[in-house]
């Protein structure tokens, strides 16, 4: 891992807040933990800081751990840890945070992990650690085969049972292998539903998937992951990515969770530029998404005329100057056409469409 990281400053709840970015997709739980603390305003950096070293982040995190006071339950018992013993364990884990932690999931719950000394850091700092790799309760055979095994235990049993002379063991091993193959993204739809149910509104946590740690938040019933890709360092308005399916192709949002269209970047040297049709389709998708979001806002549904005008204005602003005029016109006309189709579902089917001079729908 690099010895330093670039800092991105965002406006989070009307306050300038630092976010640590990374140049490549690695495990680095240190960044997920520190970004959680920054968003909670538990840790701070000097204003205008552009670069921070691994040692700086370690020092900030160590200071946070040393300032923690034991939490207590209602009956006065310390919660989850004895301060003296676990403090030393947590401090010993610090050097590992910049490279990765030994985290072993269980498939029975989104907060179920095999306990390891590394997990004490999350307990100590009161940061929930989640995953979404769960069994489907509607597959009883798979549930029986996997049970309460951790990931490491499951892999060991698959290897052992694969060469067994017992046919029942071979069948059980096959069920376990199919489970891993069918959930190769390490996120199941049942796990996604459980994440939505378990995460608290406004809670900032850490999400583990594919050996990577991400900062996660729940906002108005939806889950979002913090965008830490260094490639978006200069895009202050691009902050969150929605987590709404198992494929990992979420929508980008700003710090207020409004839909954000990522800038089109020039292809690397030697790479083929995207086709005009592909670019036009991306713009059409964006325009439709913006229109749907605006119609669902507090101001209520827009009229066809208002929507058409806004879409045309949005299209003029978002298209690149080099884009052909025909492509720009096609994006607006298709979006307006979709608007008319959606609002005309209740109209009479077949025959020529009746023209009403009093209608507020116009073709631009």
Image: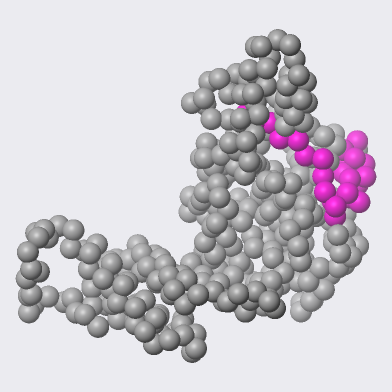
Q: Measured along the vertical axis of the image, is residue 340 above or below residue 86?
A: below
What residue span does the magenta drawing correspond to? Answer: 85-108
Q: Looking at the image, which is closer to me, 176 or 125?
A: 176
Q: Position of residue 48 (x, y in %)?
A: 76, 79
Magenta-drawn stretch contains 102: yes
- Residue 283 visible in the shown view: no
- Residue 239 visible in the shown view: yes
Q: Is residue 266 left or right of residue 321?
A: right
Q: Measured along the vertical axis of the image, is residue 247 above or below residue 231?
A: above
Magenta-drawn stretch contains 93: yes
Q: Position of residue 336 (x, y in %)?
A: 28, 73
Q: Is residue 306 left or right of residue 183?
A: left
Q: Is residue 153 left or right of residue 39?
A: right
Tell me where residue 228 sits by quadrant.
Answer: bottom right
Residue at image point 49% right, 89% down: 321
Tally of marks: 0
Q: Looking at the image, which is closer to me, 276 or 343?
A: 276
Q: Position of residue 26 (x, y in %)?
A: 77, 55
Q: Where is residue 184 in the image (x, y as percent from the top left)?
A: 63, 41
Q: Which colour scheme is used?
A: one colour
Residue at image point 30% right, 77% down: 333
Q: Measured along the vertical axis of the image, is residue 165 above or below residue 232?
A: above
* Quadrant into which the N terminus falls: bottom right
Q: Is residue 178 left or right of residue 221?
A: right
Residue at image point 44% right, 73% down: 277
Name the residue at the bottom extreme: 321
Residue at image point 66% right, 11% down: 167
* Quadrant into which the C terminus falls: bottom left
């Amino acid at each position: 891992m690099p010895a330093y990281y670039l800092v991105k400053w965002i406006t989070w709840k009307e306050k300038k807040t630092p976010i640590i970015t990374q140049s490549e997709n690695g495990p680095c739980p240190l960044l997920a933990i520190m970004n959680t603390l920054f968003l909670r305003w538990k840790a701070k950096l000097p204003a205008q800081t552009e670069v921070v070293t691994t040692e700086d982040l370690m020092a900030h995190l160590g200071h946070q751990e040393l300032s923690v006071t034991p939490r207590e339950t209602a009956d006065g018992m310390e919660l989850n840890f004895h301060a003296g013993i676990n403090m030393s364990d947590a401090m010993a884990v610090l050097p590992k945070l910049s490279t990765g932690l030994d985290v072993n999931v269980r498939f029975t719950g989104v907060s179920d992990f095999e306990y390891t000394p590394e997990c004490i850091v999350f307990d100590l700092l009161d940061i929930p650690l989640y995953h979404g790799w769960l069994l489907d309760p509607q597959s009883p055979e798979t549930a029986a085969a996997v049970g309460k095994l951790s990931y490491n235990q499951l892999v060991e049993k698959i290897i052992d049972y694969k060469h067994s002379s017992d046919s029942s063991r071979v069948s059980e091993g096959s069920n376990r292998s199919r489970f891993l193959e069918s959930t190769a993204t390490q996120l199941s739809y049942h796990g996604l539903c459980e994440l939505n149910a378990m995460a608290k509104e406004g809670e900032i946590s850490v999400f583990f998937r594919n050996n990577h740690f991400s900062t996660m938040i729940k906002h108005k019933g939806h889950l979002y992951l913090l965008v830490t890709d260094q490639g978006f360092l200069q895009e202050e308005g691009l902050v969150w990515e929605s987590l709404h399916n198992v494929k990992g192709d979420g929508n980008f949002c700003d710090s207020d969770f409004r839909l954000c269209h990522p800038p089109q970047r020039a292809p690397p040297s030697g790479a083929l530029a995207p086709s005009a049709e592909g670019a036009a389709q991306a713009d059409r998708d964006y325009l439709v998404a913006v229109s749907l979001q605006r119609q669902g806002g507090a101001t209520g549904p827009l009229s066809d005329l208002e929507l058409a005008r806004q879409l045309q204005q949005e299209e003029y602003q978002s298209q690149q100057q080099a884009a052909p005029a025909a492509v720009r016109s096609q994006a607006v006309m298709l979006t307006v056409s979709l608007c008319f189709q959606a609002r005309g579902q209740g109209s009479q089917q077949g025959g020529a469409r009746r023209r009403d001079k009093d209608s507020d729908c116009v073709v631009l």
